[in-house]
Image: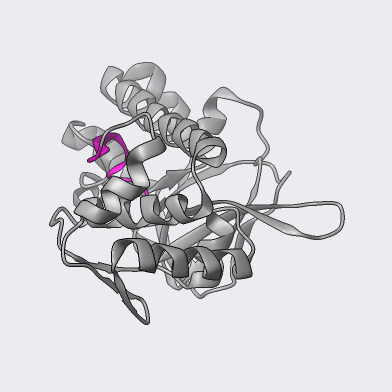
Amino acid sequence: MDDVTAAALSKIPIFNGLEPDVLDKIASHAHQNTYKKGKILFIHGDIAEHYYIVKSGHVKLFRETLDGTQTVIDVLSENDIFGHSLLFEDNRYPSSAEIAQTGVIISLPLSDLREEMYKNNDIAVNLLRAITLQLNHKDRELEHRFTQSATQRIGCFLLRQALKDKTGRPVITLPYDKMLLAARLGMQPETFSRALSRLKKKTGMKIEGACIHLDTLDRLSTYTCSSCSVKFPCKDLINKS
């Protein structure tokens, strides 16, 4: 377990604009650990004492059904925060969290965040912004489940990767394996494979392992976004993947 510096926290969106003394106080109770793939951070129903920030790697949030089937709720990446919304809910985690790709996770006490939120308008506004962004993202995903085909949902995910890189370049690298990506998009692996093949034919993209090559993003965006209420580029989703 390693300590976290105020300088490191200042790069996290939820702590943007905070005074150095506030950052120092938050950092004094923060710790970071390197976790290997498969490590469980917490289980659905556990008492929530900490919230977390992904410094590197990926974290899978999931629930298990009565028959033991795992449903992936989200896959989080660098600078994503989770567990913070429990400030406004009960004190138990609503899902389980597992390390999906080896990386570094920062943990911080929820009690400290609650105390600072009531004293500091800046962190309260940042919290509201972070939660609103997550809700917007979930609302858009729900819309896509009803209005987009499986092929279009994969295309949407790929477009968000291109936007997240801020390059618009026609080479997109999948952030994690296709099995997890299929689960993330609510598909069975075989459905994902068939949909990806259809997307390849419709857009002319080339697939080499984890790399997707396109001449431009135009064909992909035209096909994918035709049934979405948000016009491309969807800037409100750039920071989500």
- Magenta residues span 232-241
The residue drawn where x is 38% and y is 48% is 80
Does residue 223 appear to the left or right of 100 in the view shown? left
The question of residue 177 being in magenta is answered with no
Taking 172 as reference, is 217 above or below it? above
Residue 180 lies, in percent from the top left, at 54, 66
The question of residue 233 being in magenta is answered with yes
The residue drawn where x is 45% and y is 73% is 102
Quadrant assignment, res 146: top right
Residue 135 lies, in percent from the top left, at 46, 30
Does residue 167 appear to the left or right of 81 in the view shown? left
Count of marks placed on residues: 0
The residue drawn where x is 29% and y is 57% is 161
Taking 179 as reference, is 130 above or below it? above
| Dominant secondary structure (helix, strand or loop) of the stretch shown in magenta | loop
Residue 31 lies, in percent from the top left, at 41, 56
Residue 72 lies, in percent from the top left, at 61, 54
The colour style of the image is one colour
